[in-house]
Image: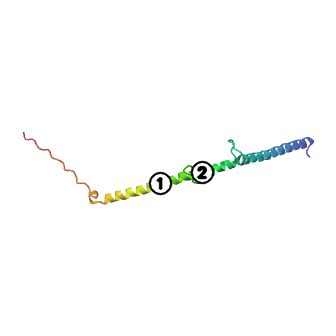
Amino acid sequence: MLTQLEMQLAAIVGIVGGSIFLFGIVYKIYKAAHRLESAIGVDEKGRTMSDRMERVEYQLWENGGESMKDKVNDAALLAKETSVEVKFIKEVLLQLLALPEMSQAPAPAKTRKRKSSAA
C-alpha cells in the first residue's frame, strides 16, 4: 500500500503536470489567435487586410505600365521582337553562305622567291 506521503506527492505531481498541460494548451491557442489576428487584422504599418489586398490587386491587371502584368507583357513583346530579329539575321547569313564565291575556299597566297644577287 501507498503511504500518506507517497499519495500526497502523487497528488502534487498530478496537479503540477495538469497545470503545465493546461498552460501549454492556453499558450498554443493564444499563439494561433495572435497569428490569425496579424494575418487578418492591422499589420505593423497600420494597413488592414483590405488595404493589402488592394495593393496586390493593383498589380494583377493592366493599368498603364505600373503593374506587374504590364511589365510582363512588355518583356514578352521584347522577347518576340528579338526572336524575329534573330530569325532574320539567321536567314541572311544562310543566304550569304549559299553564294558560290562564299562557299569556295580562298586560293592560297603565292610566295615570292628571292632573286639571287649576282654582283
Task: Give the Cα distance between marks 2 and 1.
Answer: 21 Å
Whether label 2 touches label 1, CB < 8 Å: no
The residue lying toward the viewer, choosing from 14 and 75, is: 75
The residue lying toward the viewer, choosing from 28 and 98, is: 98
Q: Element type at marker 1?
A: helix
Q: Element type at marker 2?
A: helix
Q: Nearer the viewer, mark 2 or mark 1?
A: 2
Total numbered circles:
2
The amino acid type found where label 1 is placed reads Ala
The residue lying toward the viewer, choosing from 33 and 79, is: 79
Query: With 79 as the anchor, is 105 left or right in this view?
Result: left
Q: Position of residue 36 (x, y in %)?
A: 73, 48
Residue beneath the point at 37% across and 59% down: 91
Q: Which mark is residue 14?
A: none
Q: Quadrant of the C terminus?
A: top left
Q: As displayed, is residue 54 above or below residue 91? A: above
User: What residue is shown with label 2?
Assistant: 59
Q: Position of residue 64 (x, y in %)?
A: 55, 51
- The furthest residue to the front: 64
The amino acid type found where label 2 is placed reads Gln
Q: Position of residue 86 (x, y in %)?
A: 41, 55
User: What residue is shown with label 1?
Assistant: 79
